[in-house]
Image (cartoon, coloured by chain):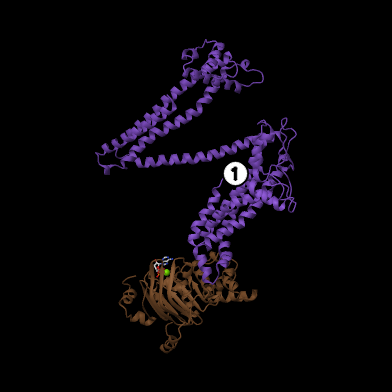
Chain colours: A purple, B brown
Amino acid sequence: MSLFWLILIVLAIAVTGYVLGRARALSSAGGERSALHSLPSYYGANVAMKSAVPAFLLLICWLLAQPFFINSTISDMIPDSAIAEGSSRGLVLAEVRRTARGLDNAVASGAIEDDFASNARADFNDVTARLKEAGQIVTSDITQPVLRAAQQYRVLVASGNFYMSIAVLLVAIAGALWALRETNKDFRARNTVEQGIKAILIGAASIAILTTIGIVLSLVFNTAEFFRLYPASDFFFGLTWSPSFSGRGGSSELGIIPLLWGTFYISVVALAVAVPIGLFAAVYLSEYASPKVRAVAKPLLEVLAGIPTIVYGLFALLTVGPMLVSVFGDNGLGIMKAGTAVMTAGLVMGIMLIPFVSSLSDDIINAVPQAMRDGSYGLGATKSETVKQVILPAALPGIVGAILLAASRAIGETMIVVLGAGAAARLSLNPFEAMTTVTAKIVSQLTGDADFASPVALVAFALGMTLFVVTLGLNIVALYIVRKYREQYD
Amino acid sequence: MNEMPNIEQATAMTESKISADKVQVYYGDNHAIKDVDIEIQPRSVTAFIGPSGCGKSTFLRTINRMNDTIEFCRVEGSIRIDGEDIYDPKVDPVQLRAKVGMVFQKPNPFPKSIYDNIAYGPRIHGLARNKSELDDIVSSSLQKAGLWDEVKDRLDEPGTGMSGGQQQRLCIARAIAVSPEVILMDEPCSALDPIATAKVEELIDELRENYTIVIVTHSMQQAARVSQRTAFFHLGVLVEEGPTDNIFTNPKDKRTQDYITGRFG
Ligand SMILES: Nc1ncnc2c1ncn2[C@@H]1O[C@H](COP(=O)(O)OP(=O)(O)OP(=O)(O)O)[C@@H](O)[C@H]1O
Ligand SMILES: [Mg+2]
């Protein structure tokens, strides 16, 4: 029975349960709705919930656990002698799975009979030949232990799937029967459904949190692995970044300082562009613009936030870079060698952040109570005096929070840097030189063909972890400030 | 508090501080103030009373053009202060509001220190040439508002951290710090306990010597206690206006009579 049909049957049981539960509840009250504790649909939902949810949970757990179980059983079947020099148990197991899949496909297409495929005495040469004939890809010639293991694998998978279907269906039916049994007019179906919905919501929330923890853990393990191969002090305090992809990266210098400097420098340029412009735009929109202008301008500005960053990257590469070169390059002031530079990436990133800053600040400025403005106007202050002396100071903590959030976005930005700032890690003060950032380097370390176990590739995780800690810190500070500000007017 | 002799009132009538003539106010299509004519005497307290939603706040706000800040609000007719039409295009509303101060229904101190709250207006209008002059303005305003003794030792604490009654008096002090000629007060005691209310009323009575005061109130007793003249509004119309004693003891209009005897509103 395929998974698809299994799911469909469980759903059918749930739907039937719903109908039956509803009917049973109604009949227990003699057909009188008002005698029921809850609306009839709640009784139905209770039955459907109790049949479908545990069944699906069991299904998911089984699907997750079965491969582990089968793998360990198969693994025991393969003697150490069957593992060739330079290979590993993992590779052999992969071979087993591939063979099993080949047999499956061959049987499904009718090229070989099921009996033959599972015949324990079948000769492995024969099987290999038949499989090749059937058009199945067999990488190396199948050895006897591999064939036996593959056959066993097929048996285990088939029986596993069979027992799983039985178990899931039994749970679904048992759940439905149990829920039907407790259905009568006094049963508090409404409260039970409420509990069930709460459990489902908690489940969703915990998945989000668990994945985050999982991501952090995977970063942590790989980072620890990196620090085993490469001294942490060299990583954190090294002033040069020159990974060598040849060999196993033994001669690489992997100092994070030039990358952090590039990240910091580009973010500062970006914020220097985005903060004043974004803030002024926000003040205009919330204090000066007529409702008509506001209704058009605000969504328009927010559209900017929806543009994919790769498009900004192209803009940096094709427009801003060459423009800057024509002014600061060899034909102009002569301090800029190529279009890719801190300035190029910073300017474009700043443009990207403008809507971000302005939209957040606009919300914060609007949250300043009208009474503040009235108080100021009532004393004969002009609009700009009111903005400067009352509104901005009152909104300041929130605006700082918005700026910090923008900063953490600038730090995490990758595409604009790759296309706008170049790839050279450099410690320099000249904003017209190419530099690169932590994120851009993470991409280039992992997309090269370096061995995944070498420090040159693993350093990406250490970089990611550092970045994660920095942005997390910034976000926490920002959220703290924003929250504190909110309390002020509540 | 109400012993202004009739002769004095009669002479005052001839040169009123504020005179409104056929004032109409619209919020979009809502005709909130209809044909209001009123003369407000200098150096006296005029009380606006009337049921909720009758347009007291709206009319008060037309006197210092605070309605300009509301997009869809339209004012017609003329309001003259010292004979000058304040809705004349030549008049700068910002300048006008320095002359006609306003205390709002809900205390709205700025999130600044007590000192900066009071100094806000004088600084904007350049009323003090140096720090010591500014200090003088701050202390005298706080003294007039009866708040000086309570706050003189903590002028650098935030104004938002004071009690509701203190905040209300802070807002009054803030309004008189710019030396306006007229002070408009919209239910200045609505959030106050009887003791704070008494203090504010006392203050209004003192301020009357130097300022022209218009006060909106829901409390008939308060109107009777502090005002010399009372105007009764109903559904956007000025029903009756006259010396406070007359309005309360001998109302001419049936609606006024019903309102002050508590039959509606
Ligand atoms: N900002 C506004 N926008 C639209 N309509 C308004 C606005 N302010 C007041 N109005 C309308 O104008 C009318 C008069 O309101 P106003 O606030 O002047 O009443 P009020 O006499 O001060 O009442 P209260 O005693 O409850 O304060 C009401 O019908 C109200 O709905
Ligand atoms: Mg009002």
- Report the residue that reaches farthest toward the left: A30
Residue named by callout 1: A310
Q: At which x and y percent is residue A414? A: 62, 43
Q: Residue at x 44, y 22 (%)?
A: A162
Q: Residue at x 47, y 39 (%)?
A: A203
Badge 1 residue CB within 8 Å of ligand 1: no
Q: Chain of mark 1?
A: A
Mark 1 neighbour density, 10 Å: few (under 14) some (14–19) many (20 or more): some
In what quadrant of the picture does the N terminus of chain B appear?
bottom left
- Report the residue that reaches farthest toward the bottom: B7
Q: At which x and y percent is residue A394? A: 56, 61
State left or right for residue B184 relative to residue B138.
left
Q: Quadrant of residue A380?
A: bottom right
Above-or-below relation of B87 to A488: below
Amino acid under disc 1: Ile
- How many labels, in total? 1
Instruction: Kindly tell me whether residue A286 is visible in this rendering.
Output: yes
- Report the residue that reaches farthest toward the front: A331
Q: Residue at x 54, y 48 (%)?
A: A306
Q: Quadrant of residue B72?
A: bottom left
Please tell me whether mark 1 sits on a helix, a strand or a loop.
Answer: helix
Above-or-below relation of A365 to B245: above
In what quadrant of the picture does the C terminus of chain B appear?
bottom left
Instruction: Kindly tell me whether residue B146 is visible in this rendering.
Output: no
Q: At which x and y percent is residue A406? A: 59, 51
> Where in the image, quadrant-wise, is ligand 2 located?
bottom left
Residue closer to the observer: A490 or A245: A245
Residue closer to the observer: A305 or A220: A305
Residue closer to the observer: A319 or A179: A319
Q: At which x and y percent is residue A248? A: 71, 30
